[in-house]
Every structure is written in structure tokens, then in C-alpha cells.
Image (cartoon, rainbow, N blue to C red):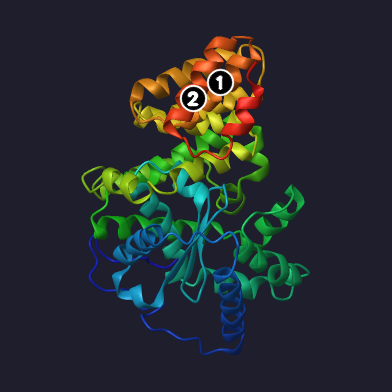
Amino acid sequence: MRTAIGGDAPTSWPTDFVQPGYKPMDSDEKGLWAIMEHAEIEMKTSRFLVRDGEVNNYIHGIICRLSEQYCSDERSYVLRTPYFNASMAPNGMMQVWTGLLLRCRDEAQVAAILGHETGHYLRRHTLERWRDVRSKSSFSAFLGLGLAAAGVGYLGPAADLALVASIYAFSRDQEREADEIGLRLMAKAGYAPSAVPEVWDQLLAEFKGSTAARDTSVLFATHPLPEERLATLNKRADELGGNSGERGKDAFRTKLASIRPMLVADELALRQYGRSEIIFDGLLADASDDGLLWYAKGEIYRLRNGEGDADRALSAYARALRSGNAPAEVHRSIMLVELRVGAQERAKEAYNAYAKLRPDAPDLEMLHTLLP
């Protein structure tokens, strides 16, 4: 394995890194770039592309902060896909899925993942993988499925996911290199290196606690993370400064405020209630006064509608209202639960509260027909 970056706070890049402004020279690398450029063109017109300018500028700013020498070579795209993943192509195209943004708790955690993917880019790991699979039967899948998925967003069934995993899986040495580079990029940029093992630990807890996550986790399909690797990340993060750097919690919440309701709604739309509960509980542990997250927990129980879920939903909605920053839709959901349990007067009160807060809501007339 090559040395990633010399020194704890590097001022120059090793010669085996892609150099700023690099263009491919070999025919096979040119071919890979051509495929990636075609995928990028498709991505720009994808219906899953998040076009919020503030969000995109914010994410691109994090990438440039991690690798400022390469800022002019890098483009980033936020894709509306409710799974945790990010990847960076050899031509500098970074894609970030919205499921990543939902799960991260601050800017440093986002930087932890983007730094790791930047490590793969700097060491041209995808090119190494490309050359490794060219002569194999999976080559056509690499072209057709693996790269087309980058511009489309949602992945298909588990069989397709397994194929993508086999194509994109980096070697252990490549993963270790990306880990080391990412940690050093974090420290150099002034972020808290402890965010790296922290965010992986959160994902590992989600993976272990949810059967559904095991079937759909693109990240763990392509980035295996056994406990011993997590221990190594913790050790290296401590050596590079631990939690002494910036976390960026306020900036993270402010910059993503416009899309947070969408992130929550997309997670709920998957109907993977056990996994969603793990995610929202983890986020609430760090932000117990977040009305949107308490509303989201209530929605899990309302939609699941199992034994005792009506009471759980109403309790979560009450916590949302006490926070003082709950979305107006919490009253609509209270109405629906109260109707389900036969509490008609409380359902009317909830409807009136919703109508007062959202007099232009498109579903008001339909909801009114549900009242006795």
C-alpha cells in the first residue's frame, strides 16, 4: 500500500495522487472518462437531481474545503435517493445521495464520507478497479448497470444491488488508503477527525439493527466495515486530533433546512419502519427538541398501525408540538389517528388546527370529508 499523505497537516500531494488539472493519457483511462462524462450528462437531466442551489453550493464547498487544489476539477451532484451513499468518479464527478444527508448530524460527518470518497479519487482506485474487471463477464454490467445507476438514482432489487457491489467493491488495501487519506484531509481542513469513526459507527448500528438495511445498504455492499476497521479509524482519529476540530452543526442544519422535510418524507416512503426508527432515534439523541423528527417518529407508528402504535404516534406528535417547531402536518396526522381510534371531537380539533396553520393546504377538502 502506498503512503497516502506525508505528515499530519500536509501542504503538498504525493506524486502517486492525481495531480490538479489531470487529463487521462492512456486509451483505457480515456474510455473510462468518456463513460463517466456520458453518465454525468445524464445525471444533469435526471429527475432525481436535487436542484436547490444553496444545498448544492454547500456540498460543493465541503468537497473543495477538503481538497482545495482540485476544486476546479470537481463537480458535485445531490441525488434524491433515500439510501446512504456517495461516490467520486475518476473525472472528478461526485454524487451525494440524500439518504446520506438525512443520517449525518453535522457538517463534519458529511465531510468524513466525502473525504473518504475523495481518497479513492486521488488514488485513482476506480481506474484500478476498471482495469481489473475489463476482462471479466461483469464488464458489460459495469458499463450498463453500474454507471447508468449513477445518473438515475434509485437502485433496483437486491440481485442488482449485489451485482453493483461486486463491480464497485474496492480491495482492502484501497479501503485502508481511502480511510487514511480521508482522515488526513479532515484534519488538514480543520474538521474534527473523530467524525469519521463516529459516522461509520452510526451506520454500523443501523445495519446491525435492521434486516431491511442489510438488503438495501449500497454503502455496506461497497464499503465493508467490520468492527476491527472501526477500531483502527478510532485510533487514527485520536492521533490526528480527535474532536478538536470543527463540527459545523449549525451550518449543516441551516443550509439543509429547505430539503429536510423531503429527506424525512423519502425515508418514510420506503416503509421500512424498523430501520427508520433506528435512524430517527439516533438523530433525536443529538437533537431532542427537533419537532420534525418527532413528527417523523409519529408517522412511523401511524403508518405501521400495529398494536399500541396509535398511542405511540400520539405521544410522538405531542413531543413534536411541545418542541415549538413542529410542521403543520402534525395536526393532520393527529386527526387521522384520532379518527382511527374513534375520538371524533379530538379529530375535529386537530383538523381545525391544521386548517388554521395551512389554509391553502390542497388536502383540506378531502380531510374534511372524513369528519363525521
- Tell me, yes or no, if residue 19 can be seen here: yes
Compared with 14, 196 (above or below) is above
Query: What is the secondary structure assignment of the residue under circle 2?
Result: helix
Camera-side residue of 19 and 271:
271
The percent coordinates of residue 299 (x first, y second) are 56, 28
The quarter holding residue 119 reads: bottom left
Camera-side residue of 3 and 111:
111
Going by the numbered disc 2, the residue's amino acid type is His
The percent coordinates of residue 59 (x first, y second) are 38, 59
- Image quarter hosting the C terminus: top right
The percent coordinates of residue 222 (x first, y second) are 59, 54
In the picture, measured across the screen, residue 98 lies left or right of residue 111, that is right
Mark linked to residue 335? 1
Mark 2, residue position:
331
The residue located at (56%, 73%) in the rendering is 40
Q: CA distance from mark 1 to mark 2?
A: 6 Å
In the picture, measured across the screen, residue 105 lies left or right of residue 7, that is right
Mark linked to residue 157? none
Compared with 41, 206 (above or below) is above
The residue located at (67%, 54%) in the rendering is 155
Near mark 2 (Cα within 10 A), the count class, few <14, some 14-19 or many ≥20, is: many
Camera-side residue of 237 and 67:
67
Q: How many marks?
A: 2
- Tell me, yes or no, if residue 14 can be seen here: no
Compared with 288, 265 (above or below) is below
Near mark 1 (Cα within 10 A), the count class, few <14, some 14-19 or many ≥20, is: many
Cβ–Cβ under 8 Å for marks 1 and 2: yes
The quarter holding residue 283 reads: top left
Going by the numbered disc 1, the residue's amino acid type is Met
